[in-house]
Image (cartoon, grey):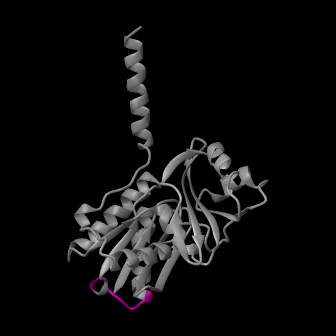
Amino acid sequence: MRILAIDCSAGPVSAAICENGEIISSDFKNIKVTHSQTLMPTVVSVLKSANLTLADIDGFALSAGPGSFTGIRIGIAAIKGLAAAKNTPCVSVSTLRGMAEGFTDFNGVLCCIMDARCNQVYNALFKIKDGVILRLCDDRAIYCDDLKAELLNINGNITVCGDGCDMFYELVKDLKNVSKASEDKKYQNAAFVARLGYKEFVNGNTVSPDELLPVYLRLPQAERELKARSENNENCSRL
């Protein structure tokens, strides 16, 4: 079984192909260019590297959120388009859970972080031991100070990863049991999504391309601003 996976949930963009649980082709770019320009060339690159075509792909997997609203929408649209011709089954995975798939050789607590701005991060915590990944909390948007307070109560090794890793680490670097992930594992990566996606396919957890939906933990900024203006206008009308 061959799974083609993508991740464009934050600044980097990546694609990978997994065959029976093993990554046979992958490409990762972090060049600060919009995903609408880089995603499809990256997909073409991994197919060419593996000497495959879309007809050889048995399923698609992607990080469906949380993450950049624009990036997630681009990823969803791309997978829908790629899968449409044959109605190829798809897997939607949590961006944060996808990160954890890259740390099966780590023992400790993994703190997956994406920068949500406004002093918040998208976060999930996972306990990993001997290759087994146990989720400790749901995906969430949480204030940085509140997350640091949680980490203070965790014994043992803690590794921080994700595109918000560097920013958040500055806040917790005084904690002796907290370290940053290595550069090759720091960011979200489709290679991890592909490995997780393969497991989901084996377990039958697939959806049709039409059923793919983004996963947002907060409203998009434009909607938040509109809601705030509406509430402000409503309050003013009561004065």
Q: Which residue is drawn at 64% across and 59% down?
A: 165
Q: In this view, does 5 lie above or below 72?
A: below
Q: Which of 223 and 156 is in front in this view?
A: 156
Q: Which residue is drawn at 49% across and 77% down?
A: 191
Q: Does the magenta stretch include residue 163?
A: no
State the image coordinates of residue 193 (x, y, percent, origin top left). Answer: 45, 72
Give the farthest residue toward the top: 239
Q: Is residue 50 magenta?
A: yes
Q: Nearer the viewer, residue 211 or 73?
A: 211
Give the farthest residue toward the left: 86
State the image coordinates of residue 115 (x, y, percent, origin top left). Answer: 57, 52
Q: How many labels does the image show?
A: 0
State the image coordinates of residue 169 (x, y, percent, origin top left). Answer: 70, 56
Q: Residue at x 31, y 83 (%)?
A: 57
Q: Quadrant of the C terminus?
A: top left
Quarter of the image where one finds residue 177:
bottom right
Q: Is residue 216 above or below residue 207?
A: above
Instruction: Tell whether 42 sits left or right of 173.
Output: left
Quarter of the image where one finds residue 164:
bottom right
Range of residues picked out in magenta: 49-55
Give the farthest residue toward the bottom: 51
Q: Is residue 162 above or below residue 84?
A: above
Q: In this view, does 49 lie above or below 181?
A: below
Q: In which quarter of the image is the N terminus?
A: bottom left
Q: Which residue is drawn at 47% across and 62% down?
A: 95
Does the image show residue 216?
yes
Q: Which of 29 and 197 is in front in this view?
A: 197
Does the image show residue 42?
no
State the image coordinates of residue 213 (x, y, percent, origin top left). Answer: 31, 57
Q: Nearer the viewer, residue 53 or 64?
A: 64
